[in-house]
Image: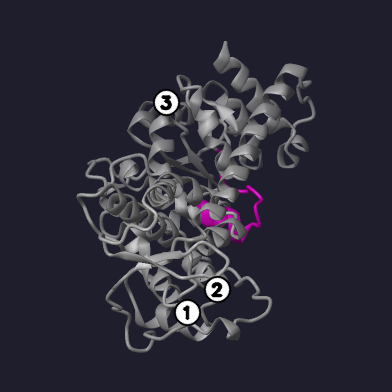
C-alpha cells in the first residue's frame, strides 16, 4: 500500500511536468493525499538542505589543513581523512567541478589553467592545498562554496565526518599534543590548524594567496564544451536507453530489457556496460562518456544499493565487482550531476529514473537531495511511460 502511494505520487509528478503533459492529454486528477505526500517529501528535502547549509557555521574555527591530518589509530584522523577523501572523489568525479570550486575559493585563473594543463592527477586535491596556504582558509569557506554551487549531495556525504571533527574539538579544545594548535584571535574562537604540514605543491603554485586580489564579484565559469559533442547521434536511427544500476537492480534491468524487446512498433537499443563488456574494457571512461551523449535517456534504477553507492555509504575502496554496471555507477552519476547542474541549468532533460517494484520505502527519503534522480515512473508502468517519452520514434 505504501509503495502504491509512492507510485501515485511519482506518477502525478510526471504528468504535471511541462515536458510530458503536452504529450499526454488525459492526465490523471491529482488527489489530495498524493499532493500531501509529495509536499511531505519536498518539506523533508528543504529541511535537510537547511541543515546542511547551517553546517558551515560550526566549522568556522577549523582550518582546511585539518583535512590532511593523518592518524589511522584516532577517531579524528579517520574523520579528517574521510572528509578529505569524500570531497576529492566527489568533486573530481564531476566534469570541471574542481575549476568551479577553485574559482569560488578565490584561486586565480592563471593558477587554474596551470593545474589543468600541467598537473594530471587529482586537481581537486591541488585546489585544496593551494587554498589552504591562506591562514584564514577555514573549512566553512569550502562548505559555503558547495552551497553556492548547489552541491548538496557532496555536503550530505561529508556531513558525518565534518560533524565528528567539530565534536572532537568542542570536546578537546586547547589540546596540543596531537600535532595541531590554535591561532590567537581577538574576538572570535581560535582557528585550529596543524602545527606543521609539508607543502608539496609544485614550485609554480607554492605561494600564499593574497585574498585582497580576489575579484570583487567572481563570475561562474562557463560550462566546458563536451569533447563528445561532435559524436554522431543515433536518434534518427533508433532511440537509446542507457541503464545504470547496482547489484540489487540487476533483476529490474533484465526485466526492462525484456519489456523493450517485446516492443514491436519501435526498435529501441538498451545499453548496459556488461552487455558491451568487450567494447567497454578497452577504455571504460571514453565508452561511458560517448554513450552518455548518444543516449536519448539515462535510466538510473533507484535501489537501496544505488543510493548507498552515490552517498558514499558503500565500500571505501574501489569496487571489485566483476559487473561493469555496478563498478561505474558513481562515474555515471557524476556525469548526470554535471549535466543537470551545468549543461541544462537544473532542467532534467535526459535522466528518467525508474523505481523498482520491490524498492524500499526509505529510498524516497534518501533521494530528496538529488532532484535529477527523482523517479519518473515505477517498474510496473515502464511500458506506458517510456512509450510517451519515445513517442517521436513510434510508427
Q: Secondary structure at mark 1?
A: helix
Residue beneath label 3, please? Answer: 255
Classify mark 2: residues with Cα within 10 Å, few (<14), some (14-19) or many (20+): many
Residue span colored magenta: 336-352
**x 50%, y 64%: residue:** 97
Image quadrant holding the N terminus, namely top right
Residue beneath label 1, please? Answer: 112
Residue at the far bottom: name it.
Answer: 204
Considering only vertical position in the picture, is 85 above or below 96?
Answer: above
Label 3, label 2: how far apart the Cα atoms are: 45 Å
Q: Name the spot of residue 198 as percent of width and height, x first.
A: 27, 76
Whether tag 2 and tag 1 are in contact, CB under 8 A, the answer is yes
Q: Earlier in the sequence, mark 2 or mark 1?
A: 2
Residue beneath label 2, please? Answer: 103
**Depth check, front residue: 372 or 258:** 372
Considering only vertical position in the picture, is 120 above or below 148?
Answer: below
Amino acid at each position: 500500500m505504501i509503495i502504491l502511494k509512492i507510485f501515485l505520487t511519482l506518477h502525478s509528478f510526471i504528468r504535471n511536468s511541462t515536458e510530458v503533459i503536452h504529450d499526454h492529454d488525459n492526465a490523471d486528477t491529482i488527489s489530495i493525499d498524493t499532493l500531501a505526500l509529495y509536499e511531505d517529501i519536498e518539506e523533508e528535502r528543504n529541511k535537510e538542505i537547511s541543515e546542511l547549509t547551517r553546517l558551515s557555521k560550526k566549522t568556522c574555527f577549523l582550518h582546511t589543513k585539518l583535512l590532511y591530518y593523518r592518524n589511522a589509530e584516532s577517531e579524528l584522523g579517520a574523520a579528517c581523512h574521510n572528509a578529505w577523501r569524500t570531497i576529492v572523489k566527489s568533486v573530481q568525479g564531476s566534469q570541471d567541478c574542481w575549476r568551479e570550486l577553485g574559482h569560488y575559493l578565490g584561486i586565480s585563473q592563471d593558477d587554474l589553467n596551470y593545474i589543468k594543463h600541467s598537473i594530471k592527477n587529482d586537481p581537486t586535491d591541488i585546489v585544496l592545498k593551494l587554498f589552504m596556504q591562506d591562514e584564514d582558509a577555514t573549512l566553512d569557506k569550502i562548505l559555503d562554496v558547495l552551497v553556492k554551487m548547489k552541491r548538496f549531495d557532496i555536503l550530505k556525504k561529508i556531513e558525518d565526518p565534518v560533524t565528528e571533527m567539530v565534536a572532537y574539538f568542542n570536546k578537546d579544545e586547547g589540546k596540543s599534543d596531537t600535532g595541531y594548535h590554535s591561532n590567537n584571535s581577538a574576538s572570535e574562537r581560535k582557528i585550529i590548524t596543524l602545527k606543521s604540514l609539508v607543502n608539496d605543491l609544485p614550485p609554480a603554485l607554492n605561494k600564499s594567496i593574497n585574498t585582497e586580489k580576489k575579484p570583487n564579484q567572481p563570475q561562474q565559469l562557463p560550462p566546458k564544451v563536451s569533447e563528445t559533442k561532435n559524436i554522431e547521434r543515433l536518434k534518427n536511427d533508433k532511440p537509446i536507453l542507457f541503464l545504470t544500476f547496482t547489484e540489487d537492480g540487476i533483476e529490474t534491468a533484465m526485466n526492462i530489457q525484456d519489456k523493450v524487446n517485446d516492443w514491436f512498433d519501435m526498435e529501441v537499443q538498451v545499453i548496459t556496460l556488461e552487455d558491451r563488456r568487450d567494447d567497454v574494457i578497452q577504455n571504460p571512461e571514453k565508452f561511458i562518456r560517448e554513450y552518455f551523449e548518444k543516449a536519448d535517456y539515462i535510466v538510473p534504477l533507484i535501489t537501496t544499493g544505488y543510493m548507498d553507492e552515490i552517498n558514499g555509504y558503500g565500500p571505501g575502496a574501489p569496487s571489485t565487482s566483476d559487473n561493469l554496471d555496478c563498478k561505474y555507477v558513481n562515474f555515471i552519476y557524476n556525469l548526470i550531476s554535471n549535466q543537470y547542474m551545468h549543461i541544462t541549468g537544473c532542467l532534467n532533460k535526459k535522466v528518467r529514473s525508474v523505481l523498482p517494484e520491490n524498492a524500499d520505502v526509505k529510498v524516497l527519503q534518501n533521494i530528496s537531495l538529488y532532484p535529477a534522480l527523482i523517479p519518473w515512473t515505477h517498474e510496473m508502468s515502464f511500458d506506458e511511460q517510456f512509450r510517451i517519452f519515445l513517442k517521436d520514434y513510434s510508427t
